[in-house]
Image (tube, rainbow, N blue to C red):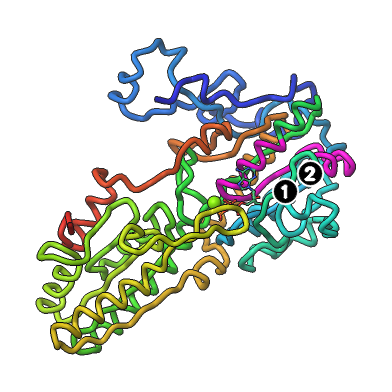
Amino acid sequence: MVTLADLQVRQLGECRHESPLAKYIAARRTNDHYVDESDRVLFDDTVHLVQDHGVPLTELPTLEPGGPRRQVFFPPGRTKVGIVTCGGLCPGLNDVIRGLVMELNTHYGVTDVVGFRNGYAGLVPAHGYEPIALTTERVASINMQGGTILGTSRGAQDSEVMVDRLVELGIDILFVIGGDGSIRGASKIAAVARGRGLDLSVIGIPKTIDNDIPFIGQSFGFQTAFTVAAQSIAAAQVEAQSAVNGVGLVQLMGRHAGFIACYAALANHHADFVLIPEVPFALDGESGFLAALQRRVAERGSAVVVVAEGAGQDLMADRAGTDASGNRKLGDIGRYLEAAIVGHYRALGRELTLKYLKPSYSIRSVPAKAFDSVYCVRLAQAAAHAGMAGRTDMVVGRRHNRFVHVPIDIVVSHRNEVAPDGDLWLSVLESTAQPPEMR
Ligand code: ATP
Ligand code: MG
């Protein structure tokens, strides 16, 4: 169970500088979302969850609210900032970069912002990637482009060498836009800086197209991703319905968590089956997936199957190997299912038309849609405020409609997954009417 101690954000020191944003704060008429250093955001949002803690109000798990403080730690106008993007692509990376540069420049007078090239490799001089200056002119319209203007990479880098480089460049705040691995890396950089007694703030803006990072609310880019994914499901349905015994098979992202598959399937109700990593299934037997699919095709003339890339890994022979960052490589469940379905119909001697769609790269590379663009800029603003206020070793997130600061330790403690007994999966079962168990 999460305790109040788990939710304490590290602070470099006392905030002695009047914030340039104090004028905006003073102008606000309501106390509603006022960020007072003594205010906290409740972690739980139901009476039962609160009661489960059984502790006095002052010890209830609460989070530090995001937003501008009256006093800041770093002197406005004399602070130097670095930004790095790492891990896989996700819609909204450029929106976050732009949001950071704009907020820091416009309101904190921070004109010295550099972008490190190609992930953490850009902080290691041996790779030879020189940082680039990020001016407001340079970032003005980058939000129209997918990907990241800074580039990204995988692969381990030495935290001591990266801190040496940050010191050499005089960086006060490093913003890391990346996934679970990058955020672990950010925490190591913060720890090395702390060990050396440096006033270096390291703030993460969590990036996960799979929405599998816990405690941060929905991740940026996720909504864009499932919107585009839903278009592939619609295409698969058209293909399936236009063929004799048509099956449309769509493989979506979701290494460990099936959120994209669930949301995309719910968006248009075209899916007859959704297969996710959290809910194991069997292929064969009367109650297995292939028999259920065959029944659905017989009833309706066609069917659409949505599968997350991490689903059904237990069905395939062990796939050894890892990527450059040490992440386990997955077996290709889409191809595996395609072969299994084709084989099943062939064995029955029945006609089948199967169309396999794997749109991952055309999903993760699109520019963010409006909702995510708004979310990205607001996350970036919250991150800028947190960094200027001397927070470190934390990420920004959103809980109960409030931007919050979440310590990295707790964010990387586990993964956010679709609960097989939760209301999202129930909605998917209701929408697809697939058997609740295919075992
Ligand atoms: P995605 O989830 O999209 O893959 P990610 O940030 O998890 O994003 P990784 O390739 O795992 O992507 O990691 C990105 C960077 O973070 C790499 O440079 C990697 O070396 C570093 N990193 C990953 N895991 C750790 C770790 N446990 N400690 C320190 N650094 C790490
Ligand atoms: Mg990762």
The structure residue drawn at horizontal position 18% and vertical position 71%, both measured from the top left corner, is 293
Identify the magenta region.
161-189
Q: Is residue 432 left or right of residue 189?
A: left
The structure residue drawn at horizontal position 42% and vertical position 65%, both measured from the top left corner, is 331
| Residue 284 position (above or below residue 106) | below
The one nearer the camera, 89 or 374, is: 89
The structure residue drawn at horizontal position 70% and vertical position 26%, both measured from the top left corner, is 70
Q: Is residue 251 left or right of residue 199?
A: left
Q: Is residue 56 left or right of residue 49?
A: right
Image quadrant occupied by the N terminus = top left
The number of discs equals: 2
Q: Ligand 1 closer than 8 Å to the CB at disc 1?
A: yes
Q: Ligand 1 closer than 8 Å to the CB at disc 2?
A: no
Image quadrant occupied by the C terminus = bottom left
* Residue contact at pointers 1 and 2, CB within 8 angstroms: yes
The circle on residue 162 is 2
- Callout 1: few (<14), some (14-19), or many (20+) C-alpha neighbours within 10 Å? some
| Residue 63 position within the rendered picture, expressed as x and y whole percent measured from the top left | 51, 27
The circle on residue 157 is 1
Question: Which quadrant of the structure image shows residue 81?
Answer: top right
Q: Chief secondary structure of the magenta span?
A: helix
Disc 2 is placed on an element classified as helix
The structure residue drawn at horizontal position 62% and vertical position 21%, both measured from the top left corner, is 37
Please name the amino acid that badge 1 sits on.
Answer: Gln
| Residue 107 position (above or below residue 314) | above
| Residue 340 position within the rendered picture, expressed as x and y whole percent measured from the top left | 27, 75
Please name the amino acid that badge 2 sits on.
Answer: Met
| Residue 284 position within the rendered picture, expressed as x and y whole percent measured from the top left | 18, 66
Q: Is residue 177 magenta?
A: yes
